[in-house]
Each structure stands twice: as structure tokens, then as C-alpha cells.
Image: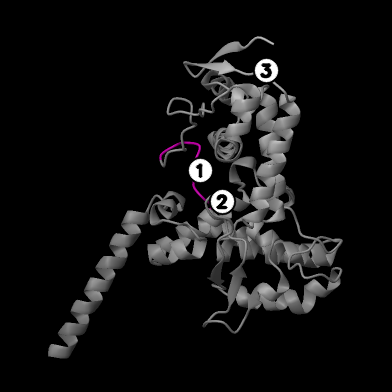
């Protein structure tokens, strides 16, 4: 069989006869890639979500990963943009492919070059890597105000007494209070077990977040989160009066079969509850907006930024700053607090010298 000549990323590569089906080989590579996630300790929910994202990405590209060109990445990202998909979604498609391609380079490069005649060069470059949403992007809506959050929780609390099923209504109240006061991601809340509640640890009690989000290659990043703003009382009530009405299992916020709520279920549940509340679409928010509200509201009341970083489980303070969206009167409010404190000190000094 004669050799073939293929131009890949601008370089000519002499091909040997192909001996493997490219789609079968890619499927085997995907399985190996997923196995590496499990070996690094990613949670089952994260693995399931990322498998789906990788499969959608590879389907959209329409060719084996080693044959993908920068123009293919441009096409897929452009189609997502035309379909109105958020910048964060487009970035996820690019990043999952980039991670898979990197896995191929490290683990499968020799087999791919021998079997398909391609020397791997990643087609993701500075021109098609989906940019991060900037701090001043109009897509980054401000988080709900403290007043709006309080109104929503009052609605949930009142609903407990009137809902057709007491247990799910009470669970929703405790779960969304936890998302807000502890600044948790939906997936972190869904993976909480009852033994993760430590009421005697620290002055407020703490939640052990065993599956905190880490960098894509680092696996879970556990952390301890204090139960602030009376969250310990809410969770004690939930364990004593509510959790026993669900099937027995280790899961804290269980569904009606005793299993974990998927993060998508939590998002849909919040949307349903705000529809019941009767709020217009412009006055609704997502579970992640509650996390950003936790960061913003704590910052506005004077909590140290590094403390908020530790609370949310961010790697850097710069990540936390992207979550902080102070109110329109934040500067004026801070000025009034500073002036009031100064006047109080001067008054105290005057009284002591009199």
C-alpha cells in the first residue's frame, strides 16, 4: 500500500497505512480519559456532566480529535455564539476539548502517529480560545440585594405551612439558605452528607465540603465552611424535624427516593419556586447568583476579602473579586461609616479630656 502525504497544522507528515478505525480508537481514548478523572478523585456528578460535554463537543467537531483544525474550533465556537449560548458555555466546550487533546498528547501520541500518521498539535490558540467574561460585561448581572434574598426566604418559610408536601418545601428552605449563607456551589450542596455537618467545630459549627471545586487537573479541593448568620439553627431544625421524613440515606438534601439532588434539579427547583413567588423574570436569580450574593453582601458589611475567598473556596483573591458586585451606594455607605466612626472617636476623646 502506498504512503500518503497529509498536511497537518502547516507541516507535512508521511503517513503509514491506517490500521485502526478512527472512531473506535477515539471512543477507547475517551474511556481512558474518563478513567483518569475518576483516578484523580472527581465526583461522580462531575464525571457524568463532563462526559456529556465532551461527547457534545466531539460530535459538533465532526472528526477525530487528532484531525481537528483551528478552523473547526472557530466553526463550533461561532455556531454556539450564533445560537445565543453564553460565553461561559463556549469556553467550556473549548476547555473540555483542550483537556482531551492534552490527554492524547501525553498518553496516545505514539499510537496516533503510528496508526493515523498525525503528529498532534493542539488547534486551540489565542485566536479561537473563548475569552472569559470581563468584569464589566453586561452579561454579568448584579446579585440579588439583601432585601430581595430576605423576601425570597420569607416566601419559602411561609410556603412550608401551605405546601401540599411538607418535607420537600422544608428541604428547599434549608437548602437555599445553605447555598446563600455558606456560599456553596449547587454541586457542593448536592454532595453534602449528614456526617458533613459538624455543629461543635468552631464558634458557629462548620460544613465539611469534601468535593469542593478545584482546577480541572487537580481533583476535588475540600474545605471547611462556617455556618454563619444562624445557618446552624436552620440545619439543626432540618435534621431534627425534616430529614427523617425522607428515605434513610447519608445524603443531606435528599430527593424523595433518598438520593442526591442533581445540580440541574436544584437550578430548576429554584426557577419553579420563583415562578410560584410571582416575581417577574427580571427579578429572578440563579443558584450561582446566591453564591455571588454571599460574597457581595459579606464584603459590603466589612468581612475581609481573604476570609470571603476562603469561604467560597477560590484559589485566588482575584477570582473572589469577580464575584463581588457592590451596590450603587457602596461608596457613599462606606464613607458614612468611616465618618461616623471618626466622629465617635473624636467625641470619646473630647469626653475623656473634659
SS at circle 2: helix
Q: Main secondary structure of the magenta part?
A: loop
Q: Are marks 3 and 1 in contact (CB under 8 Å)?
A: no
Residue found farthest to the front: 1
Q: Earlier in the sequence, mark 2 or mark 1?
A: 1
Packing grade of label 2 (10 A; few <14, some 14-19, many >=20) is: many
The region drawn magenta spans 136-144
- Tell me the mark number nearer the camera, choosing from 3 and 2: 3
Q: Secondary structure at mark 1?
A: loop
Position of residue 303 in the picture relative to residue 6 (left or right) = left
Front-lying residue, 67 or 195: 67
Q: Residue 154: give x, y in percent of width and height.
A: 66, 63
Question: Mark 3 or mark 2: which comes first in sequence?
Answer: 3
Whether pointer 2 and pointer 1 mark residues with C-beta atoms closer than 8 Å, the reply is: yes
- Of the numbered discs 3 and 1, the one sitting upstream in the chain is 3
- Residue found at x 32% / y 61%: 334
Q: Out of 150 and 325, give the one closest to the viewer.
A: 325
Tell which tag, 3 or 1, sits nearer the viewer: 3
What residue is shown with label 2? 289
Which residue bears the numbered disc 3? 17
Q: Quadrant of residue 181?
A: bottom right
Please report the residue visible at 80 percent of the width from the left and 62 percent of the height from the top.
168
Q: Is residue 305 above or below residue 344?
A: above
Residue at the disc numbered 1:
141
Q: Quadrant of the C terminus?
A: bottom left
Residue 111 inside the magenta-drawn segment: no
Amino acid at each position: 500500500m502506498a504512503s500518503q502525504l497529509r498536511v497537518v497544522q502547516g507541516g507535512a507528515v508521511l503517513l503509514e497505512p491506517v490500521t485502526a478505525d478512527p472512531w473506535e480508537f477515539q471512543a477507547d481514548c475517551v474511556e481512558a480519559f474518563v478513567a483518569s478523572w475518576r483516578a484523580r478523585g472527581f465526583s461522580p456528578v462531575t464525571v457524568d456532566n463532563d462526559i456529556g460535554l465532551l461527547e457534545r463537543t466531539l460530535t459538533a467537531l465532526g472528526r477525530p480529535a487528532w484531525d481537528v483544525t483551528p478552523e473547526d474550533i472557530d466553526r463550533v465556537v461561532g455556531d454556539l455564539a450564533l445560537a445565543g449560548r453564553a460565553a461561559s458555555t463556549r469556553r467550556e466546550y473549548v476547555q473540555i476539548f483542550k483537556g482531551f487533546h492534552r490527554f492524547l498528547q501525553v498518553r496516545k501520541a505514539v499510537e496516533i502517529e503510528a496508526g493515523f500518521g498525525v503528529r498532534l498539535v493542539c488547534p486551540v490558540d489565542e485566536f479561537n480560545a473563548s475569552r472569559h467574561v470581563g468584569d464589566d460585561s453586561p452579561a454579568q448581572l448584579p446579585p440579588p440585594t439583601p432585601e430581595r434574598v430576605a423576601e425570597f426566604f420569607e416566601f419559602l418559610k411561609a410556603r412550608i405551612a401551605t405546601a401540599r408536601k411538607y418535607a420537600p418545601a422544608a428541604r428547599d428552605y434549608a437548602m437555599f439558605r445553605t447555598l446563600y449563607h455558606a456560599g456553596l456551589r449547587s454541586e457542593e450542596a448536592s454532595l453534602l452528607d449528614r456526617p458533613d455537618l459538624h455543629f461543635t467545630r468552631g464558634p458557629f459549627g462548620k460544613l465539611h465540603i469534601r468535593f469542593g471545586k478545584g482546577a480541572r487537573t487537580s481533583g476535588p479541593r475540600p474545605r471547611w465552611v462556617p455556618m454563619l448568620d444562624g445557618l446552624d439553627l436552620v440545619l439543626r431544625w432540618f435534621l431534627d424535624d425534616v430529614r427523617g421524613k425522607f428515605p434513610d440515606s447519608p445524603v443531606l438534601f435528599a430527593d424523595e427516593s433518598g438520593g442526591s439532588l442533581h445540580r440541574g434539579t436544584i437550578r430548576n427547583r429554584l426557577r419553579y419556586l420563583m415562578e410560584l413567588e410571582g416575581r417577574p423574570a427580571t427579578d429572578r436569580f440563579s443558584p450561582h447568583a446566591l453564591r455571588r450574593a454571599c460574597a457581595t453582601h459579606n464584603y459590603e458589611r466589612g468581612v475581609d476579602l481573604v476570609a470571603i475567598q476562603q469561604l467560597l473556596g477560590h484559589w485566588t483573591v482575584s477570582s473572589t473579586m469577580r464575584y463581588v458586585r457592590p451596590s450603587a451606594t457602596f461608596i457613599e455607605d462606606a464613607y458614612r461609616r468611616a465618618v461616623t466612626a471618626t466622629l465617635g472617636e473624636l467625641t470619646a476623646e473630647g469626653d475623656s479630656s473634659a
